[in-house]
Image: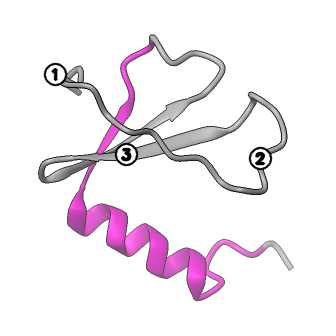
Amino acid sequence: MTKPTNRLHWLRSSRCATDTCVEVTRDGDRVLLRDSKNPEITPMEFSLAEWAAFVSGAQNGEFDFV
């Protein structure tokens, strides 16, 4: 994992009503994910393909625990 080198615009869900959410941003050809409670910690890093696979899985119910 590498630290982001520029100012990034972090996004969090509109359903997040507290400061205890995850935040996501895109930095070039990678997607970064961090804990909003600890923004100084190096974020998790994913390729665009990895992120697309995750989003697709979430949209298709692959992570539903029903």
- Residue at 27% from the left image edge and 26% from the top image edge: 7
Number of the label disc, if any, that sits on residue 33 = none
Give, as a three-letter code, the residue at label 2. Answer: Cys
Residue tagged 2:
16
Residue tagged 3:
25
- Residue at 61% from the left image edge and 27% from the top image edge: 36
Q: Earlier in the sequence, mark 3 or mark 1?
A: 1
Q: Position of residue 39 (x, y in %)?
A: 51, 18
Give, as a three-letter code, the residue at label 3. Answer: Thr
Residue 52 part of the magenta-drawn span:
yes
Q: Earlier in the sequence, mark 2 or mark 3?
A: 2
Nearer the observer, 17 or 51: 17
Span highlighted in magenta in the image? 41-64
Label 2 secondary element: loop
Callout 2: 10 Å neighbours few (<14), some, many (20+)?
few
User: Is the residue under label 3 in contact with that under label 2 (CB below 8 Å)?
Assistant: no
Pick the quarter of the image with the N terminus.
Answer: top left
Q: CA distance from mark 2 to mark 3?
A: 16 Å
Q: Position of residue 19 (x, y in %)?
A: 74, 28
Nearer the observer, 30 or 7: 7
Q: CA distance from mark 3 to mark 1?
A: 13 Å
34 w.r.t. 26: above or below: above
Residue tagged 1:
5
Label 1 secondary element: loop
Where residue 24 sits, quadrant-wise, is: top left
Give, as a three-letter code, the residue at label 1. Answer: Thr
18 w.r.t. 41: above or below: below
Q: Position of residue 3 (x, y in %)?
A: 23, 20
Question: 39 left or right of 2?
Answer: right
Residue 10 part of the magenta-drawn span:
no
